[in-house]
Image (cartoon, helix red, strand yellow):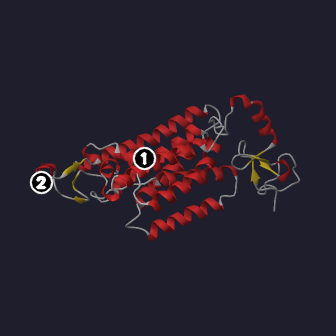
Amino acid sequence: MSTETTPFCYRHPERETHISCQRCGRPICPDCMNQAAVGFQCPSCVQEGQRSTRSGRTAYGGRRPEDPTLTSKVLIALNVAVWLLITATGGRGSEWIERLALFPVGQCWFGPRMSPGVTEEQCLPAGGDWIEGVASGGWWQLGTSMFTHVDLMHIAFNMLALWFLGPQLEAAVGRLRFLTIYLLSGLMGSAFVYWLTPEFTPTVGASGAIFGLMGALLVVAYKVGADYSQILLWLGLNVMITFFGRGLISWQGHLGGLVGGVLIAIVLVYSPRKNRPVWQGVGVAAIAAGFLIAVVSRTLVLV
């Protein structure tokens, strides 16, 4: 094979390699590989990183967290706290579900059941409790539904995934960027649910945000030339669960979260190094604007 198509270590030109430095992208051989948060770095980039240790920045501009598990612990605690609240107040019959779940349109609540199609004017005189939907003003549900679970297995699986995926991603991109991926991916999942789920179907769960983490980690691993087979395996397993559990599992939220995570990660890791924070800010703002446009346009269709 010719040297035009085969990569060779930039420090040892006689050594063929298929590993690249996560910071500069140059090919490096095993003798030049230095373990990083995700993938490997070459000796030159390690030295550059040591010179800038005082800034404590990750390869993508974020501040390097002292404890990359902290944010995931806080997010898990919030999800568990909401689940305990719902469980302690009636489980599926809890009034907190009607306040926190994502309802595309307003619905009438009679005790533990919904009555789709009943208007607010008909609901209240009949002794029902009117629940606002996103289209009728319950905009907060796009965010609160991300922290709401009812079933034990649902929250257990999502939090286990968050515990395994979150610290890896936070170590790679920094705390603020990690939170941006998690929250905006979850909101993108909510937007897909808002558009693609039947109007009277309530949706809960952090799965959209979790799929966003998987998509983002896949992009980061691809960027640094790391082995992403385990991420693909995890993603494939979740896609299979989503497919076979359709009707009970929100494929809409999963798809939206995955798309959101991939797009945000592309913006964060492929932004030019020069003026990187500006490029990242503009890119993330554009994705957030797309989310808002999707929500507003869907609302105009429903009202």
Residue 266 on image: x %, y %? 57, 46
Residue in front for this viewpoint, 56 or 229? 56
Numbered disc 2: secondary structure = helix
Residue 205 on image: x %, y %? 42, 54
Question: Callout 2: 10 Å neighbours few (<14), some, many (20+)?
Answer: few
Residue in front for this viewpoint, 26 or 303? 303
- Tell us which disc is closer to us: 2 or 1: 2
User: Residue 110 occupies which quadrant of the picture?
Assistant: bottom left
Q: Is residue 75 at least partly visible in the picture?
A: yes
Task: Please determine whether, in this image, residue 230 is positioned above or below residue 52.
Answer: below
Q: Residue at x 36, y 43 (%)?
A: 293
User: From the viewer's perspective, is 28 left or right of 84?
Assistant: right
Q: Which residue is mark 2?
A: 126
Residue 106 on image: x %, y %? 23, 50
Question: Callout 1: 10 Å neighbours few (<14), some, many (20+)?
Answer: many
**How many angstroms separate mark 2 from mark 1 (CA)?**
35 Å
Q: Give the number of marks.
A: 2
Mark 2 and mark 1 residues within 8 Å of each other at the beta carbon: no
Which labelled disc corresponds to residue 256?
none
Q: Which residue is mark 1?
A: 187
Which residue type does callout 2 highlight?
Ala
Q: Residue at x 83, y 53 (%)?
A: 30
Residue 122 on image: x %, y %? 12, 52
Task: Please determine whether, in this image, residue 221 is positioned above or below residue 68.
Answer: below
Task: Please determine whether, in this image, residue 185 is positioned above or below residue 116.
Answer: above
Q: Is residue 267 at least partly visible in the picture?
A: no
